[in-house]
Amino acid sequence: MSKIIIIILFLSNFYTCAFAATGCSLNDPDRDVKRLFPESTGYRTEFITIEEIGGPELYRNIEKELGDRFDNVYETIDVPYAFYDILKGKDIIAYIHGVNQKGKYGGMQLILATDLNGRILDFFYQKMSSPEAAKFMDKNFTKQFIGLTLDDFIKGNINITNPSIKSHEDFLATLRGLKKNMILLNELRLKK
Amino acid sequence: MNVLGIAFKNLSRKKIRTTLTVSGVAVAVAVLVSLFGFDAGYQKGLDNDINKLGYHLLVTAKGCPYEAATLMLKGGGGLRYMEDSVYKRITSDNRIDKITPQLVSSVYNQEGPEGRGAFTLYMGIEKSYLDLKPWSKFKSGGWFSSNNADEAIMGYEAAEVEQRSVGDQIFIPGAEKVMKIVGIFERTGTQDDGMIFMPLSKAQEIFKLPNKLTGIGIKLKDIRTIGKFEEDLYDEPGIQIVSLAQVRGTILNLVSSARAMAGSVALIAIFIAVIGVTNTILMSVFERTKEIGVMKALGASWSDIFKIIWTETILICGLGGILGAALAGIGSSLVEHIIRTVLPYAPAGKLVLIKPSFLVISLLATLVMGLVAGIYPALRASLMKPIEAIRSGE
């Protein structure tokens, strides 16, 4: 029996381990929440789609605000976005939310921690495939986004240094993904 | 004498008791039907999964399979490899219908904070791979332009996770290689959905494994020759053979203990139901001792009394059987959900397959159960002496 274990694993679709998070939820929420908010006592997760909040009209409005069309395969109206309410006792003290964004060499997962007004408290890449990934994931790059709000993204009040000239597309993709993330937070969570 | 009418009337006198007894029988039948359904559904699902794998045999390098499986899961360079000369030797065997070499490699991609990341599986293949998996269709794009091209084909889910389309690039960490996506497979429901494929010789080159393979998939012209073929391959040094017939048997063995337990529960449920039915009818007979005495005094024969009591039992079991069969049909999704959460491996597709024949068999079994359970109370009632019955009932 023992030598058959490999095939059983194949049959058991073990590849799901290799591709654990297909959405934009946190891979290890307990650890991430504690790391980002040591004072928190817990968190609550909610998955929300554009479809259930505002339907096609909201979908078009978000595209307009983003200034770009959504990808018709990977950014459809029914994509569930994960929102984590960070709790201290019974009070919500912050939000964590993530989005997928197409990068030059693979999918990126961009995670934001914000205060209750949507101001960025922290930003990190949960996943990024690129020869230049280390430069993008470097704290010196990600910390530049701390303090920004959706207004800053919309008005263009951001002054972020591109960490890699070789991978300019990934820099632009990061900015797009974060703007999308902020708009979604505003439309699906803060306005709710 | 309208035996059926009298039996109905008698049962409807004690509605709650009759309902509870019928429910007991129904639960036992529902368990039995579900068990038959699970057996059939599981075997069918497993056969489908194995057929989808495409091979009759998988030849791998000799070594501890647990270790190999762990390495494949957890990554690292410790996977066992065999020389591709083995493939060249085997391929000339005229019993083989289709054969394909493959090289699997897993690469850890540190793509997140605090050193976190995930393993990605890559597989080097030749075009013969598609011959063994004719259901693998391209959702977009197509095959590699050459055997040494810097090109990749992605499984459906791998493309979804990486948000790739044909023409995009993909970066292979560790190998520090950028490849162009030339094709994306449709969803197959197999492990292929999560794989990233590349030409075999390119995989050997970028993972620095020249002339190495991790597996050879084989489909025979005649499945009945599998035993002899396997035996002959054992002469080949450094390899081990995994036969899918063996895999099927092993997985069925894995679930057989769960099935045996469920079977025991079904048997116990049936046994309790039989006792319950006997007890109910017996109580009913005791309560009607005087009535039975009067019936006999008025000319009812012992066979009339026997028929009435027996019919009551059969009615209870028949109703319970119909109700149980309906319950099993309605509740099959729930049973399937429970089984999937409990079993270590459950094949794709419908896991509880309730065929009409199972319902017929279960109904017949219930009627037989009714016939058996009714014998003692019916005999007891029919053999009563009229005078004694009337006196004892006073």
Image (cartoon, rainbow, N blue to C red):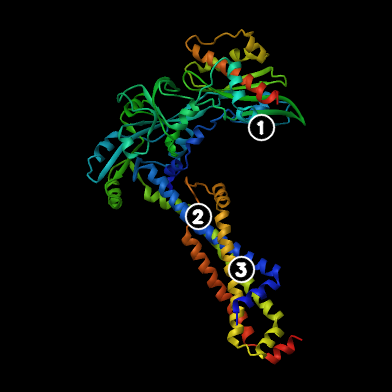
Query: In the depicted view, which residue is nearer to us: B344 or A182?
Result: A182
Q: Quadrant of the C terminus of chain B?
A: bottom right
How many residues crowd around disc 2 within 10 Å: few (fewer than 14), some, or many (20 or more)?
many
Q: Quadrant of the N terminus of chain B?
A: bottom right
For label 3, the residue is B273
Give residue A68's quadrant in the image. top right
Horizontal placement of A89 versus A147: left or right?
A: right
State which chain disc 1 sits on. A
For label 2, the residue is B38
The local secondary structure at tag 2 comes to helix
Point 51% across, 29% down: residue: B118
Point 35% across, 43% down: residue: B55
Disc number placed over residue B292 in the picture, else none? none
State which chain disc 3 sits on. B
Disc number placed over residue A45 in the picture, else none? 1
Q: Does the residue at mark 3 contact the one at mark 1 (Cβ under 8 Å)?
A: no
How many residues crowd around disc 3 within 10 Å: few (fewer than 14), some, or many (20 or more)?
many
Residue B220 locus on image (x, y percent): 28, 46
Residue A166 locus on image (x, y percent): 47, 10
- Counting the numbered discs, the total is 3
Camera sees residue B284: yes
Q: Does the residue at mark 2 contact the one at mark 1 (Cβ under 8 Å)?
A: no
